[in-house]
Each structure stands twice: as structure tokens, then as C-alpha cells.
Image: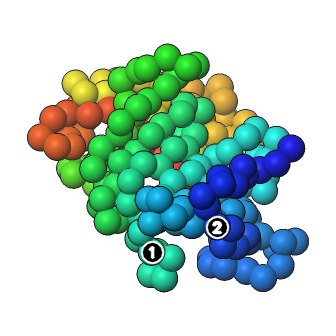
């Protein structure tokens, strides 16, 4: 299966392999691969890129660049978010503008924004505080886990009204903590994030561990 269909009016530029900390020269040490073409009509560089761990799942991201060096993101970017939904982001010269489409199982849904992209996000200090509060409340349950000394990673959505949804525990050894975590999160007074002057849903990650 061809990973990139080259348009008749496009010129193939390069296939680039990236590592976690920058461009790498070896496919064997790459984290993801990007196919770049230049479109003579739009005068933009168009790319599609895939995680080398997720090639079997189709494309993970595609978009347009005004420039390669420096890289300037401009226009629409499509990707699959951590919840498995298809998202179309709009950028203007590296500035995130908004989410245009958010598809859940093929149906348009209320967008869930990455916390780091919104105008008024949940701050890093607030995220750490949430994790600390959860650990304090659940220290007994955590001590009973087989790997109680390990860090526990969780993700959840803070809704427009400050309530919680889509909570998940990323560590398999701590799955049974989920109902306790949800209960404690729902008792917290969390403020919603805001973007373009309105409350929005955001996806948040935090860590539970003993300091």
C-alpha cells in the first residue's frame, strides 16, 4: 500500500526519518517517518507522517507548511488524538487558531482540545496539584498494589463545566484504582479551560507518586 499518493501538480521533496529528539539519518533508529511534497498550486509544502509503531493503523497526521527551514505550520492539520478521535486543527503561521472538525467514530462531536494549545489552559502547577491530591487521598489503595512504588499515569477530560469524563489509568497494574480516582476527581473544584473566549473541553495528564 502506498503511504502517500503524489498529486500530478506536486513535486516530491523528501522522505525524512525523525527520532524523539530531532532528525535522524537511520530508519532503524527513527520514531516516525514524514513524506513531504511541494504543491505548485498552493505554493505550500504538504506532508503526511506516521509513527513507525502505528503504520498498520493508517495516517497519524497530515498538514501544510509555508516553509521547511524554519518549519512554519500553516493551514489544516489532521491527526488522531490520544482518545482515538480524528481531529482537524487550524493553524496560521505557527499559531493555533481552533479545531475545525472533531470526529468520534465518524460522527462530528464536541471537540476535546489538547491542554497545551488553548489560550487559558490548566497550568502545570494545577496539574501537579491534582496528582498530589489524588495520591494523598488514595495512598492506602496504592500501597496495596503489587507495584506500589511505581508512578501511576492517568488521563482525563475536564469538561466545560469543570466536571470530569473519559478518565483512564495508563498503567495496567493500577487499573483497579480507576473508580476511586474518578470519585476523587469529581469531588475536586476544577476550573474549565478557555479558548477564543469560551469554555472548552481539554485532555489532561497527571502522575500519582510518592515524593
Q: In this rendering, would 21 be left or right of 200? A: right
Q: Residue 80: x percent and y percent?
A: 57, 40
Q: CA distance from mark 2 to mark 1?
A: 15 Å
Q: Earlier in the sequence, mark 2 or mark 1?
A: 2
Helix, strand or loop at disc 1?
A: strand
* The quarter of the displayed image where residue 111 is located: top left
Taking the view exactly as shown, the residue that stands out farthest to the left is 197
Q: Residue 170: x percent and y percent?
A: 63, 40
Q: Residue 4: x percent and y percent?
A: 72, 52
Helix, strand or loop at disc 2?
A: strand
Nearer mark to the viewer, of 2 and 1:
2
- Please tell me the numbered disc located at residue 67: 1
The residue that label 2 is drawn on is 11
Of residues 177 and 126, the one nearer the viewer is: 126
Of residues 65 and 102, the one nearer the viewer is: 65
Q: In this rendering, would 197 be left or right of 201? A: left
Q: Residue 153: x percent and y percent?
A: 57, 46
Amino acid at each position: 500500500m502506498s503511504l502517500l499518493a503524489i498529486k500530478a501538480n506536486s513535486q516530491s521533496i523528501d522522505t525524512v526519518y525523525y527520532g524523539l529528539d530531532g532528525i535522524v539519518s537511520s530508519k532503524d533508529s527513527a520514531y516516525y517517518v514524514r513524506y513531504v511534497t511541494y504543491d505548485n498550486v498552493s505554493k505550500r509544502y504538504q506532508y503526511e507522517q506516521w509513527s513507525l509503531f502505528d503504520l498498520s493503523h493508517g495516517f497519524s497526521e497530515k498538514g501544510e507548511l509555508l516553509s521547511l527551514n524554519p518549519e512554519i505550520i500553516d493551514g489544516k492539520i489532521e491527526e488522531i488524538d490520544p482518545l482515538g478521535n480524528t481531529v482537524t486543527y487550524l493553524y496560521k503561521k505557527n499559531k493555533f487558531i481552533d479545531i475545525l472538525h472533531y470526529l468520534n467514530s465518524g460522527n462530528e462531536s464536541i471537540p476535546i482540545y489538547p491542554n497545551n494549545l488553548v489560550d487559558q489552559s490548566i497550568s502545570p502547577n494545577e496539574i501537579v496539584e491534582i496528582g498530589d491530591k489524588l495520591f494523598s487521598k488514595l495512598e492506602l489503595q496504592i500501597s496495596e498494589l503489587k507495584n506500589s512504588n511505581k508512578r501511576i499515569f492517568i488521563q482525563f477530560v475536564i469538561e466545560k463545566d469543570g466536571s470530569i469524563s473519559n478518565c483512564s489509568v495508563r498503567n495496567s497494574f493500577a487499573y483497579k484504582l480507576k473508580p476511586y480516582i474518578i470519585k476523587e476527581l469529581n469531588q475536586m473544584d476544577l476550573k474549565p479551560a478557555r479558548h477564543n473566549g469560551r469554555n472548552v473541553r481539554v485532555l489532561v495528564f497527571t502522575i500519582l507518586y510518592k515524593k
